Amino acid sequence: MATTCVVCHDPLVMTVDPDSDVEDQPSSSSSAAQAETVPDDLGLACGCHYHWQCILDNASSVANSLTCPACNTYLSSSTPPTINAVYTSEGSSGEPLDLLPTIREEAYLSTNPGARPARAMQTMCAEGDVQGILELLSETEETERDALLRYQDPLNGMRSGLHLAVEAGQLEVFWLLMWLGSALRQEQFPDEVWGLVQALEVGRIDGQDIRSLRDGSGRTAGDLAAELGGVWAGIVGAGPVPVNENTITQVSVPEIAQLFVIFMELRYAS
């Protein structure tokens, strides 16, 4: 059984910090304050073992060649390709996993480091994290907010944040993104939304209308909403500019009340 990483030759463990209350103990309790180790063992089908970070450090070469960096064995035997691996660590039971999606993501981010915050924002869009989106935008240089808002992920079918919000049914994020990145006029927004963004002084971000962005299948967020139906049927229509002017001013969305609560909490927390 392998005990060291084939890259750095260190033991297949990682050091974890002791509990935070250790520092409050007397210095005579130094043995309790010693750092602990947990397994950090990624095994590939070829038999080579790596630290998790060590394999990620070689992500670009693995993604391009699908071979083990140490022994050069071709790692995939399926179509579409996969890389079977077993990772053992704290909280991990050592079950088989397909390593290739993680490898491709890390390879992409290593050559496109600026995509990290954009992909983080897309995760927030899918999860409905309005507060996180506002905080990320506030921490981003004004000249970079356009690219952040309109980023389309090549690792996820060229979806935009608006696509992900529609797909996940995140109405609060939908209205926020529409305000930030569409050319929809103020009077076309429900009064509740307009009142909230005005109170919070949330400005709009110039650039391509976010509604016109198409994913890898050629769909706008409006096209996707039309496919999904449900609540979106009364809000979004089809076409390159997918919000129907006549419908948007008539629709009453109960979730706007929740959006009001979220925005007011943000306002008074700052």
Image (cartoon, helix red, strand yellow):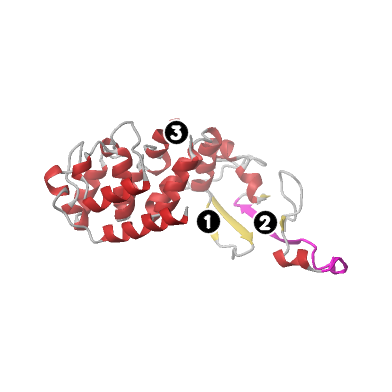
- Where residue 117 appears, as percent x and y from the top left, is 49, 42
Q: Secondary structure at mark 1?
A: strand
Distance between mark 1 and mark 2 Cα atoms: 15 Å
Instruction: Find residue 172 and report its image quarter.
Output: bottom left
Residue type, mark 3 in image: Glu
Residue 229 seen in the current view: yes
Q: Residues within 10 Å of mark 3 (few under 14, many from 20)?
A: few
- First-in-chain label (1 vs 2): 2
- Where residue 34 appears, as percent x and y from the top left, is 80, 63
Query: Residue at 34% of width from left, 51% of height from top?
Result: 173
Instruction: Find residue 215 and report its image quarter.
Output: top left
Q: Secondary structure at mark 3?
A: helix
Q: Is residue 109 left or right of residue 189?
A: right
Q: Which residue is mark 3?
A: 142
Query: Residue at 39% of width from left, 37% of height from top?
Result: 151
- Give the residue at the far right of this rendering: 28
Q: Is residue 167 left or right of residue 243?
A: right
Q: Which residue is mark 1?
A: 97
Instruction: Determine which of the numbered discs, if any, sits on residue 40 in the image.
Output: 2
40 in magenta: yes
Distance between mark 1 and mark 3 Cα atoms: 40 Å
- Where residue 228 appears, as percent x and y from the top left, is 22, 53
Q: Which residues are magenta?
A: 26-45
Residue type, mark 1 in image: Leu
Quadrant in which the N terminus appears: bottom right
